[in-house]
Each structure stands twice: as structure tokens, then as C-alpha cells.
Amino acid sequence: MLEAKERRSLAVAVAVIIGFVEPAVAQTPAVEVSGGYQAPYDNSIEKWFPAGWRLDVAANVNETWAVLADVGHASRSEGLLDVEVGLYTFGGGVRWSRRTVSRLVPFAQFLAGAALMRSRADVAGGTLTVWQTKWMVQGGGGVNFLIGKGWGIVGEADFRRIL
């Protein structure tokens, strides 16, 4: 059995080791990249854009705040008139994250930028393409479930307003 002095020395050694290991595990990455599927809803035409993707890159300023850039695309087709509508979004903003020792990292974010709407139709043997650009603001949040070092699954819901 260990004597009291040896137990104290062992306890101090373990505390020092944990003190160095814990910050290494909980370190905030300098850059985070996420991407995935999106299905935006357009209130003006009351329709979903079922085929979409998005990609964002966040540069972490500290363990709580990040500067964020986001790009996305979604499209839909109207079979009756053979019209394809595409929505492209480009935004930048900030993200707040709550990092703890657990694997769940909740976050909230705000973006502002531009939304480009492209409508393309085959008319009289040719193709007619119309572009429209508007301002866009977007707020939302979600959670990142960390599954490994540098890997996670993100669930997110946002409200995007095209002005």
C-alpha cells in the first residue's frame, strides 16, 4: 500500500498530467469547414427548392467567436414550361459556439450577403436566361456532434430573408 506522501505525489502528478491533456483535447481548431444538403423554401412562389448544397468556412477568432463565409446553391424545375430556377447565395458573418468537454457543440450564426436567382427556359428553339440579384440576411443555429478528431456531424436550421 502507498504511504500518504506517495499518494499525494501520485495525486499531484495525475493532476498535472490531466491539466496538460485536457486543454489539448479541448483546443479550438483554427479553421472549420462544413458542407451538406439544403432545401430552401421560397415564400414568394410558395415552393421548395429540393436539390441544394452548401459549404461554409469558419475562421475561429477564439474558442467562442468565428468569422464565417458561406456559399450555397439550390434548384428546381417546372416541368410544364420546362423552366429551371437556380438560387445561389453568398454570405459572410459571425458564429458563436459553446465549446465544452462534451462532443456536442451548439452554435448560433448570422450572415449577410447576396442571393442570385437564375431562371432558364427553352423558348422558340433558343435558351432564355434571366438573372436577378438581391440582398440576403440569414440567421440560425444548430449543433455539431463531434465524432472524431476534426470530424463531426452538423444539424442546422436557418431563416434566410431575401430582400
Image (tube, grey):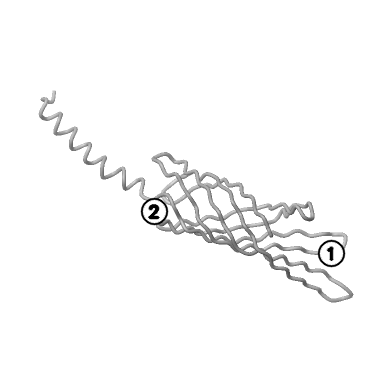
Q: Does residue 85 appear to the left or right of 28 in the view shown?
A: right
Residue 28 is left or right of residue 57, and the answer is left
User: Which of the marked residues, 1 or 2, is nearer the chain's N terminus?
Assistant: 2
What crowding class fits label 1: few (fewer than 14 Cα within 10 Å), some (14-19), or many (20 or more)?
Answer: few
Indicate which label's residue lies in the foreground, 1 or 2.
2
Classify mark 1: helix, strand or loop. loop
Q: Quadrant of the N terminus?
A: top left
Q: How far apart in space, not on screen, are marks 1 and 2 (Cα)?
A: 49 Å
Residue where numbered disc 1 is placed: 82
In the current view of this chain or complex, which residue is farthest to the front?
Answer: 163
- In the foreground, 70 or 144: 70
Q: Position of residue 79 (x, y in %)?
A: 84, 59
* Residue 109, horizontal then vertical, whole percent: 53, 51
Residue 23 is situated, as x and y percent measured from the top left of the image, at 31, 46
Report the label total: 2
What residue is at 21 percent from the left and 40 percent from the top?
A: 16
Tag 2: amino acid: Asn
Label 2, residues with CA under 10 Å away: few <14, some 14-19, many ≥20: few
Instruction: For mark 2, give the secondary structure.
Output: loop
Which residue is depicted at the point 87% across and 72% down?
Answer: 123
58 or 152: nearer the viewer: 58
Residue 62: numbered disc: 2
